[in-house]
């Protein structure tokens, strides 16, 4: 047998290998077209019709479509990152991941990259179909800044997802309930379908710990003429906070993963409880 | 280089009740005082009923579970304190596991696991082709694993275990779910693989006596978390060579009849099993001539004797002698 990689090469191989099933899923499982595009669009339509019925500013329709697209990432972070290790444990994959000489951070990063790639396809589809359906045009004022915000939003969101995954290592089925609990309130707090500025300042500031909040606010400011007037903070501040959240979540994920893996090994929670 | 591939000293593991399992307040001793030394190149078996502690021991040795007491090393590294050195040297296959992803093909699943060990794609693909040939699954290389039968899935798992050519391979009931022919093929390959290189070691758990007897250089018999005996299968059976072992088939026996047989002087053990048309009894006698009183007792109770066979001791008999009950009786409480 040939030589084996170690160090960063092993890390990179692990990331790519774990991302692979998620990338392949897009091609082999077609149900996501219904569940991840059509159903979210139905929710988007409901908000659009409410705004139209009230004669709201047309930019708000674009806000709703952007919210629908970005919410795909939140769903992915919750269900395919936070709760993923529970399913990996059930199938026996988690034991094999831990037992292999790779880093669990590489596994989480692979899950995150695979999730980002597949969800970007879903988000782009929601954005494109929603814009066509409702005749929305986005007016991008600073494409480079928009790219930076989007990239930071993904790093912060998936960093948070990696942190959740580490924390949920200790949970069994109760993790599923926590994920369910975090789903809808975050749509409200992050202003998925309305400008977060409508909240009291401190509520909006508190909600900013969810990367979706500031990312959506900044993206809206950068893609519509009325965005700046409806924005919560200026884009520069939001970018700085998102960068900070990215660093904090990634460091926390790494720290928690090490601690909780140790605890899970001590308590016998990495595998099903066969004796 | 370490002479011992696996070593444990007074190893113990206690499962404490979790916070959400308040109804079950008892601690459960899964492993107690286990001391083993497995030299390199050995095919070592752990034989015991379900719940004996075999899987717990494997979990500890594969760095997935911390011991509550004692110490264990694989390839000279402490499994609890130095897992980063243990992990590159080992792999594991569990019976009935559903690892991998159903939407990936057999080749893709195996490739993915090979990547976690740092194998290049070309090495991995070459090795996958070789192993699938060995487990007679070459024609399924591009089949999604969700479309495999239980047996084929287990063959894929077996291939995964050998894929990384580990120094120490842990096989936890590896033939579970395989048909007779596939089990035999798997056993043959396991034996051939471990003998090919002196550095390779296998620790195999099973509750199939034939598997342990046929495959293992040495066997540890484990029950209730304790190792009761550890030796070669021949030496273990030699413990019983003074005893005479008979298998008899008779008309239906009641509990009182079996108790009366067991109480006869010179009867070491009488284990009874109801069959479709009567009773099957395994008798372990201190001397062959004790058979006379047993037959006399059956006659006095007008119980027809249908067949009587003397047989050589098996590992099952060794287990019965050590535990006092058959493995099946232990499993059914």
Image (cartoon, helix red, strand yellow):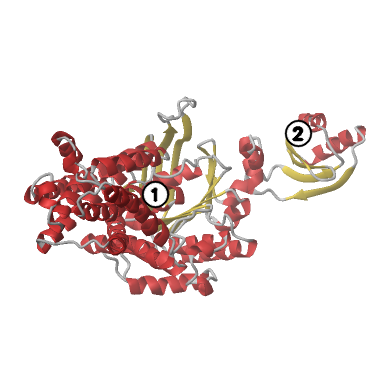
Report x, y in % for residue B319. Answer: 62, 42
CB-based contact (under 8 Å), mark 1 and mark 2: no
Which quarter of the figure has residue A138?
bottom left
* Front position in the image: B4 or B82: B82
Q: At 42% across and 59% down in the image, what residue appears?
A: A34
Q: Label for residue B266?
A: 2
Q: Is residue A47 above or below residue B294?
A: below
* Front position in the image: B205 or B7: B205
Residue B8 shown left or right of residue A226 in the figure: right
Chain identifier of the residue bearing label 2 in the image:
B
* Front position in the image: A109 or A220: A220
**Mark 1: secondary structure:** loop
Q: Is residue B20 above or below residue A103?
A: above
Report x, y in % for residue B239. Answer: 62, 43
Count numbered badges in the picture.
Answer: 2
| Residue under disc 1 on the same chain as residue under disc 2 | yes
Quick one: label 1, few (<14), some, or many (20+) residues within 10 Å? many
- Residue B171 visible in the displayed image: yes
- Residue, disc 1: B62
Which quarter of the figure has residue A255?
top left
Q: Label for residue B35?
A: none
Q: Earlier in the sequence, mark 1 or mark 2?
A: 1
Chain identifier of the residue bearing label 1 in the image:
B
Q: Is residue B196 above or below residue A170?
A: below
Residue B84 shown left or right of residue B252 in the figure: left
Quick one: label 2, few (<14), some, or many (20+) residues within 10 Å? some
**Mark 2: secondary structure:** loop
- Residue B7 visible in the displayed image: no
The quadrant of the rendering that contains the N terminus of chain A is bottom left
Report x, y in % for residue A198. Answer: 18, 40
Question: Mark 1 and mark 2: span between their CA atoms?
Answer: 45 Å
Report x, y in % for residue B28. Answer: 48, 31
């Amino acid at each position: 047998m040939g030589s084996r990689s170690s160090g960063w090469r092993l890390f990179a191989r692990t990331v790519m290998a774990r991302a692979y099933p998620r990338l392949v899923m897009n091609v082999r499982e077609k149900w996501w077209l219904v569940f991840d595009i059509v159903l979210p669009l139905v929710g988007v339509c409901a908000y659009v019709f409410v705004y139209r019925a009230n004669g709201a500013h047309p930019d708000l329709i674009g806000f709703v479509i952007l919210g629908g697209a970005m919410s795909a990432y939140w769903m992915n972070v919750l269900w395919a990152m936070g709760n993923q290790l529970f399913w990996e444990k059930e199938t026996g994959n988690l034991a094999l991941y831990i037992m292999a000489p790779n880093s669990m951070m590489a596994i989480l990063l692979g899950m995150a990259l695979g999730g980002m790639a597949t969800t970007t396809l879903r988000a782009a589809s929601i954005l494109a179909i929603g814009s066509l359906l409702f005749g929305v045009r986005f007016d991008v004022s600073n494409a480079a800044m928009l790219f930076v915000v989007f990239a930071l939003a993904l790093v912060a969101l998936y960093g948070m997802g990696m942190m959740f995954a580490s924390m949920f290592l200790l949970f069994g089925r109760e993790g599923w309930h926590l994920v369910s609990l975090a789903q809808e309130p975050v749509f409200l707090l992050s202003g998925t379908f309305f400008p977060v500025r409508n909240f009291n300042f401190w509520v909006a500031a508190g909600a900013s710990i969810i990367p979706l909040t500031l990312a959506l606010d900044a993206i809206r400011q950068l893609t519509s003429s009325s965005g700046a007037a409806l924005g919560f903070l200026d884009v520069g501040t939001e970018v700085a906070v998102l960068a900070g959240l990215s660093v904090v979540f990634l460091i926390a994920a790494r720290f928690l993963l090490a601690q909780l893996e140790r605890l899970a090994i001590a308590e016998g929670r990495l595998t099903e409880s066969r004796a | 280089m370490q002479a011992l591939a696996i070593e444990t000293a007074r190893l113990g593991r206690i499962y404490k009740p979790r916070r959400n399992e308040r109804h079950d307040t008892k601690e459960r001793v899964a492993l107690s005082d286990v001391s083993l030394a497995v030299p390199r190149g050995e095919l070592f078996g752990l034989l015991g009923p379900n719940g004996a502690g075999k899987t717990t021991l494997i979990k500890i040795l594969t760095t997935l579970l911390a011991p509550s007491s004692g110490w264990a090393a694989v390839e000279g590294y402490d499994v609890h304190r130095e897992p980063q050195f243990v992990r590159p040297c080992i792999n594991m296959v569990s019976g009935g596991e559903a690892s991998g992803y159903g939407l990936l093909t057999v080749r893709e699943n195996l490739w993915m696991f090979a990547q976690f060990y740092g194998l290049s794609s070309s090495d991995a693909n070459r090795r996958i082709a070789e192993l699938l040939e060995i487990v007679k699954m070459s024609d399924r290389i591009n089949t999604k694993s969700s479309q495999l039968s239980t047996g084929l899935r287990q063959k894929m798992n077996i291939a995964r275990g050998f894929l990384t050519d580990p120094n120490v391979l842990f096989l936890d009931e590896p033939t579970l779910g395989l048909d007779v022919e596939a089990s035999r093929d798997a056993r043959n390959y396991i034996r051939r693989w471990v003998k090919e290189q002196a550095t390779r070691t296998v620790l195999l758990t099973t509750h199939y006596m034939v598997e342990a007897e046929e495959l293992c250089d040495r066997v540890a018999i484990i029950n209730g978390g304790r190792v009761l005996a550890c030796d070669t299968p021949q030496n273990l059976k030699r413990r019983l060579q003074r005893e005479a072992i008979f298998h008899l088939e008779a008309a239906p026996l009641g509990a009182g009849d079996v108790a009366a047989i067991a109480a006869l002087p010179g009867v070491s053990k009488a284990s009874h099993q109801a069959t479709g048309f009567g009773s099957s009894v395994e008798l372990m006698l201190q001397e062959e001539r004790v058979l006379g009183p047993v037959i006399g007792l059956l006659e006095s109770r007008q119980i027809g004797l249908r067949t009587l066979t003397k047989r050589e001791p098996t590992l099952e008999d060794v287990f019965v002698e050590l535990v006092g009950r058959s493995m099946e009786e232990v499993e059914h409480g």
